[in-house]
Image (tube, rainbow, N blue to C red):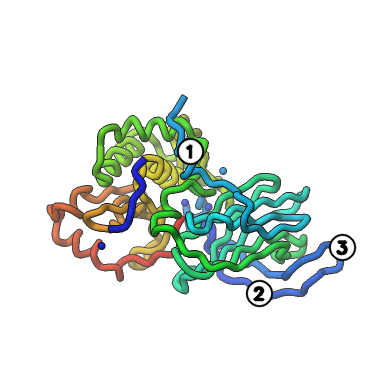
Amino acid sequence: MKVWKRVAPIVLALSLLTGCAAGAQNPGDGNVYLDMVQLEEVEIEAEAVAMAAAPALPDSMIPVASGTKVVKNAKATIDYSNIADGYVMVNYTATTDKQIKVKLVSPSTANEYYQYNLTPGQWTTFPLSDGNGEYKVSVMEHTGVDRKYAVVASVTFEAAMADEFAPFLRPNQYVDYANAVNTIAKAKELTENIADPLEKVQKVYDYVVENLTYDKERAANVQSGYLPVLDSVLAEKKGICFDYAALMTGMLRSQGVPCKLVTGYAGTAFHAWISVWTEEAGWVDGAIYFDGTTWQRMDPTFASSGHSSEAILKYIGDGANYTTKYLY
């Protein structure tokens, strides 16, 4: 596993929430709440609604609740021991039939807050995708009234990453390759003896788009909170755009390629893309992108050789053409 050092970033947009408002504290049902918030309905934009004997990952890449920095009560535990490695872990330990969510407020003013569903009784990893700065992580329990959630545990901390790639190499809730042994094995097979990150992108992309078919039934019935199971996607050889993106991102990360799964806009159109990092070009945005219908791959040599069309290079090079909303 090559760990990148800096030299001299489809439920997709399943977190497209428009805001929250403070509510009353301690609703009087015997529970101790820290705060009350009201979550707006998720804005579903087509497929954006979609966004838990092989080679093992190094121990350093496997998220772990270390227990050195913890906020804990009778209902939930937030472990932020490993913020330098770009992640925080949450476990809702109480028994409940209520919906549980995690709200993550990041340092970036350009992004909405992130919202995730949480399954009680198990540790779940969430990335600190916006780099260094102040984060607030809250565990929220549905009160049974409209869209109101009670905050049962919360912590605010200042994150200083060991390096900028920390959140984009490890598994998390959306790109959960930690136990996807077949996915890791296939990625290793596809990229064997290849050092160039963009060549790895090409091999992984070609395999995924040539072997997976678009699952129209799943796309028509997908529910908010859907999460890809990478080995299942690999075995079934079908999926929606979130499955494609998560599988490609998981494969690339497992082979040491820093990779961001990004959702946002290109111009005014909803867009999803995968950004990879190379020593020659830094972060390459749009190396793989979803144009609303199909996944496309830019010329994998454009960053180092400049052989792509001038129009493509000009578009990719102009950050104004891309509006990032969420990084996973």
Q: Do the residues labelled 3 and 1 touch (CB within 8 Å)?
A: no
Q: What residue type is labelled 1?
A: Leu
Q: Is mark 1 on a helix, strand or loop?
A: helix
Residue indicated by mark 3: 30
Q: Distance between the residues labelled 3 and 2?
A: 23 Å
Mark in the foreground, 3 or 2: 3
Q: Residue sitting at 73 percent across and 49 percent down?
A: 93
User: First in sequence: mark 3 or mark 2?
Assistant: 2
Task: Determine crowd level at label 1: few under 14, some 14-19, many 20+ residues with C-alpha closer than 10 A.
Answer: many
Residue furthest out toward the top: 53
Mark in the foreground, 3 or 1: 3
Q: Residue sitting at 81 percent across and 64 percent down?
A: 32
Closest to the observer, 272 or 122: 122
Q: Are marks 3 and 2 in contact (CB under 8 Å)?
A: no
Please say if 279 is above or below 133: above
Task: Determine crowd level at label 3: few under 14, some 14-19, many 20+ residues with C-alpha closer than 10 A.
Answer: few
Q: What residue type is labelled 2?
A: Ala
- Quarter of image, res 201: top left
Closest to the observer, 206 or 32: 32
Residue indicated by mark 2: 21
Horizontal and vertical percent for residue 2? 34, 43
Residue indicated by mark 1: 230
Q: Which mark is residue 285?
A: none
Q: What element carries label 2?
A: strand
Question: Where's the N terminus, which quadrant?
Answer: top left
Residue furthest out toward the front: 68
